[in-house]
Amino acid sequence: MMQLRLGWMMGVAALAAAMAAAQPADTAPQVAEGVVIGSLDAVGYVTLSRAEVLSRVSLRPGQRFSAAEAAADVRRIAELQAVDRAYYSVEVTNGQVALTYVVVEKNLVRSLILRGNKGLSDARLTRELTFTTGDYLDVFAARAGRDAIEELYRKRGYAWAEVTLNEAALTVGQVEYIINEGPRPKIRDVRFEGNHAFKDSELKKAIKSRSKKFWVFQQYYNPEQVSEDQQKLIDVYQKNAFLDVKINSEVLFGEGKKTATIVFHIDEGPVYLVDSIRFVGNTFFDEATLRQEMRLREDFYFSQDRAEFDAKKIRSRYRAHGFAEAQVELKRTFLPDARVAVEFEIQEGSRFRIGEVVIVGNRTLQDHSIRRVLDEEEFEPGQWYDADAARGDGTGNLEEIVRYSVVAESAVITPAGDDPNTRDAVVNITEGQTGSIMFGAGVASDSGFIGSITLDQRNFDITDWPDSFGEFITGKAFRGAGQRMRISLNPGTEYSTYSIDFTEPFLYDQPLALNVGASSFYRYRESYDEERLTGSIGLEKRYRDDWRRGVSFRGQRVRISDLDYDVPKEIRDVEGDSMLYGTRFYIRRDRTDNRYLPTRGYHFDAGYEQIFGDFTFGILTGTQRWYHTLYEDLAENKTVLETKLHAGTVLGSAPMFEKFYAGGIGSIRGFDYRGISPRRGPDDDPIGSDWLVMGSWEIAVPLGSQRFLWLFFTDIGMIDSGPVRSSVGTGIQIQIPQFFGPVPMRFELASPITKDDDDDTQPFSFSIGALF
């Protein structure tokens, strides 16, 4: 819309210049040419001031008049936003020129009127406009507003809505839209006829037209959506080998078009099978190697999607081994009886090593911050040019790693040069916003309400001290080395945390991370208050096969205060301050396909920490999570099974604040937070277990998309006292999109199956959080 407005203004300026040249004046400009200017004035302005108009002109009293300069002045005046057109007039009196610039200002939007709208309010409709009362009237913006309002009506189910702009009223500054809403048919039903391969319930998941959304919200007929759904159904059938499928849609309206029944008529046609698969032109890889991970198989279903996937897979295999210019052409031959002969014609091309790595586009990011990421991935001079990881469009795995590691908006790696044996790699970086201040809030059944203020700089440079206070204020200091500095303030009603963390991801330019941090933690417990002040330092080594191992050290002061008078001895004994010094060794591996919503793979983490100080003991823990896709519907939404196993044990004698507790979100649901524990004292206060074993199985079923999931789960666990605890339950998870990744909201309802009489139960649990 702004482009339309700007284009119109430029057009007005050009028109004004043309009019100025043709504008009649009291005295012809040629008569006044070269005569001294005696007076200078401006007239016709309304919202502008005389000074604003004359500030755009170059001619002044005392100068000699020039028609060319006056025309240039007019063009500059016409560039003012408020000006519709301008011209000048001259009059020679007593041997001097009286020069007057005449301004005709644009009209204003003096009133904005909507007539005929009943289903949508004035406030909702005006949100579609790019102007409001008091703005300069732009006829193109007014017409675009008409189209925007009409489009909104279409989306809201008013398929026959018409919006008319009263253009005659524009001359007096009145923008008037006359709306004929027409009927708004409710979708009564969506039916399918002729489908045999897929059930109605399966096809409904692939389309968006439906009578109710989430079984509650009424949906309305939208002809554009029906057309999209028709094409979506064709795509679904063709992906499943029904290449000749024909689908037409029919809409049956009720009386007065108050309701609509959508019917999709389907002629499925035959199922196409793969007759044969041939490879032509391959010399580097044999046929057996190329067939690995292919989706097509002889005598199995053929689809264009599977064939194109296999062609890309073959090309990727070549490009990953240095054949940066390899091409694969897919050829199909249709045979009788719905069979297809498939041929992959391969042009291998030359095999290249990496020549030079050239980095461009980075302004604040230092070159070595980018090169060390490439070196860790073994993309460096002399190595084979992996053109699959560096695809040249920003979607390659290496490009994604670089983009994420240096917090760039994009990272594109393209081959360059004409050497017969090498290709230079040009890494084009588009820098993103590396620093941010985030404000947020959350509430959970386990922890109450908590606020959040986070300052995060992911392109930090601890050595780049400011040369002036101005550099510090403007953010030009402490930037460029790819380090991370994060300060987080999280005050809450039941617990509060405050922390500052520094990370050098490439210590000595090696895949070795240095983490240094300090934090404060305060929590109101059942019968006492717990406060922790912690300083920590750690090193973590990364490996190519996704394994990581590390060592971390912590020094921590734990303060137990404000005890109830009748707390058990285990709590009374640790009242006051305790000093702990711990060294933890750990290994971990993440092989999941998505960090936010994994559908396959696993995550493993295990470690041992030895504690010294006021207490001496060890803590051994391990966690394994598996993810497996159980089912993928026709809309490519995945039902995922997550299996989790967690175990931990204390070696030696640990204070109660370092022992294990179970129950609550992320633990055994259906029980209160820390509701599973050995207990002592008259109030049955939890004192912690020396060991813990937990397992859970959770199935996440998408409700139309992966953003809305229906959860079914069972949890089980044991501690060093009492029976096995277990529960079953269900819940809803909603993914809230954020710029750094989705934030989940969870609402869970669980019921214990087996429990101890002393356990605290909590059937309903929830967790809600968002940043803004």
Image (cartoon, rainbow, N blue to C red):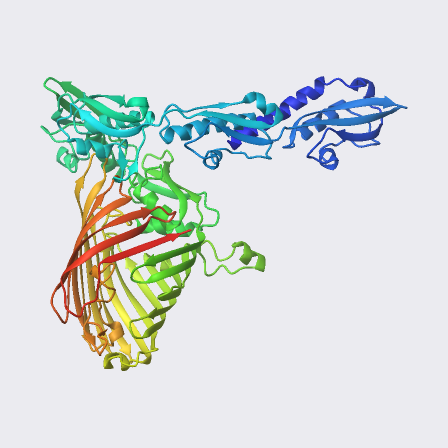
Residue 380 visible in the picture: no
Q: Residue at the far front: name it.
A: 255
Q: Position of residue 686 (x, y in %)?
A: 23, 73
Q: Is residue 728 left or right of residue 500?
A: left
670 up-or-down from 34: above or below: below
Q: Is residue 684 left or right of residue 474?
A: left
Identify which residue, 111 or 152, lies in the foreground. Answer: 111
687 up-or-down from 9: above or below: below
At x 14% / y 71%, what residue is drawn? Answer: 720
Q: Position of residue 169 (x, y in %)?
A: 58, 23
Q: Position of residue 358 (x, y in %)?
A: 41, 43
The number of discs equals: 0
Q: Position of residue 420 (x, y in %)?
A: 32, 34
Q: Residue at the far right: name it.
A: 94
Identify which residue, 34 or 126, lies in the foreground. Answer: 126
Identify which residue, 88 or 167, lies in the foreground. Answer: 167
The quarter holding residue 589 reads bottom left
At x 17% / y 56%, what residue is drawn? Answer: 696
The quarter holding residue 701 reads top left
Residue 188 visible in the picture: yes
